[in-house]
């Protein structure tokens, strides 16, 4: 007599929306180059270097905010290394509508760009009243590109300080927030971002030190992790890689 209600309950649970999102490796963008035909970094008021190599910011792609996942989706993706089941609030931390979420992510991106500019100019001891930086990256939101924006500005204005490129001609990727003082913060989704980075040719990945364990757990072959806590350390590590000598913090 109870079989039908139990089966019905199981079916309901299997298809009911759950507070999770399914994420996968997203696009990467070279901040030293162009995105959709527009330079990501434009500087005026100071000489700009011609750079080689790439500095790639990384992203994850998640299920749409209005497409909550079911139990079946969770089970199907839980053990996949190219997918991650994440709490909905960690992917979409505010608002319920797509418009609210997009507005929030755009605001975070703008704050990240402002902080990246401040951090870079502070590091280079340049006057923000004289040197202007314009950052443009279409269709990307959130704060996690802060570190790569900052390194891109530094590379375009100073490089390694002796005429060379921070990248050493490599494809370097990474993630991390940054504040005006140059402190690097954690972001989440690192295992997926390392996959995106390696897919797009990166051999070095800059990761916030606090997320080293996550990055190491499913690290793609051929990708070297460099642990970062602040801008100065990130620059020093890249210069050490370029020069082939010096301390390079690993995970």
Image: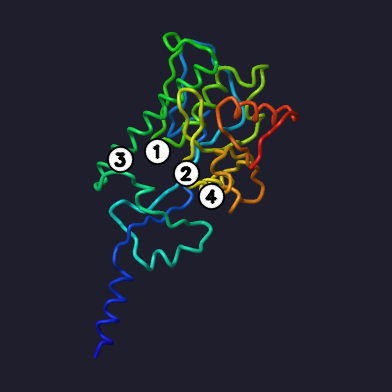
Q: Measure how far apart labels 3 and 1 are at the Cα level.
A: 10 Å
* Above or below: residue 167 compared with residue 162: below
Marks 2 & 4, CB-CB < 8 Å contact: no
The x and y percentages for residue 237 are: 65, 30
Whichever of labels 3 and 1 marks the residue nearer the N terminus, that label is 3
Q: Nearer the viewer, residue 51 or 98?
A: 98
| Residue under the image location 64 percent in, 21 percent down | 160
Report which quarter residue 113 is drawn in: top left
For label 4, the crowd category at 10 Å Cα-Cα, with few meaning under 14, some 14 to 19 and many 20 or more, is many
Please tell me which residue lies in front, 152 or 116.
116
Q: Residue 61 bears which disc, if any?
A: none
> Of the residues tagged 2 and 3, which is closer to the observer?
3
Q: Residues within 10 Å of mark 3 (few under 14, many from 20)?
A: some
Residue receiving disc 4: 191
Tell me the residue that label 3 is attached to. Answer: 102
Label 2 belongs to which residue?
27
Q: Position of residue 198 (x, y in %)?
A: 59, 46
Is 83 located above or below residue 161 in the figure? below
Return the mark for residue 140: 1
Identify the residue at horizontal 24%, vertical 91% (top origin): 1
Distance in Å between CA atoms under marks 2 and 3: 17 Å
Q: Are marks 4 and 3 in contact (CB under 8 Å)?
A: no
Closer to the camera in the image, 138 or 210: 210
Nearer-N-terminus badge (4/3): 3
Give the farthest residue toward the front.
Answer: 210
Residue 83: x percent and y percent?
A: 48, 57
- Residue 139 x %, y %: 37, 38
Q: Nearer the viewer, residue 63 or 199?
A: 63
Q: How is the image coloured?
A: rainbow
Q: Secondary structure beneath disc 4?
A: helix
For the residues bearing labels 4 and 1, Cβ distance under 8 angstroms? no
Q: Is residue 158 left or right of residue 77?
A: right
């Amino acid at each position: 007599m109870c079989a039908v209600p139990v089966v019905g309950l199981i079916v309901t649970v299997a298809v009911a929306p759950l507070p999770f999102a399914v994420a996968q490796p997203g696009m990467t963008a070279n901040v030293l180059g162009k995105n959709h035909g527009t330079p990501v970094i434009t500087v005026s008021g100071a000489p700009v270097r011609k750079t080689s190599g790439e500095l790639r910011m990384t992203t994850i792609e998640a299920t749409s905010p209005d497409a909550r996942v079911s139990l079946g989706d969770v089970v199907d993706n839980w053990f996949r290394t190219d997918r991650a089941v994440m709490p909905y609030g960690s992917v979409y931390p505010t608002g319920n509508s797509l418009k609210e979420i997009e507005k929030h992510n755009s605001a975070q991106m703008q704050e990240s760009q402002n902080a990246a500019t401040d951090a870079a100019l502070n590091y280079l001891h340049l006057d923000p009243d004289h040197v202007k930086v314009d950052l443009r990256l279409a269709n990307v939101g959130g704060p996690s590109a802060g570190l790569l924006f900052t390194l891109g500005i530094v590379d375009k204005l100073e490089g390694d300080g002796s005429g060379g490129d921070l990248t050493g001609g490599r494809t370097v990727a990474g993630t991390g927030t940054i504040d005006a003082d140059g402190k690097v913060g954690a972001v989440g989704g690192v295992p997926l971002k390392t996959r995106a980075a390696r897919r797009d040719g990166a051999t070095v990945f800059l990761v916030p030190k606090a997320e080293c364990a996550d990055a190491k757990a499913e690290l793609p072959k051929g990708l070297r992790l460099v642990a970062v806590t602040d801008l100065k350390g990130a620059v020093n590590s890249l210069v050490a890689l370029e020069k082939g000598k010096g301390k390079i913090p690993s995970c």
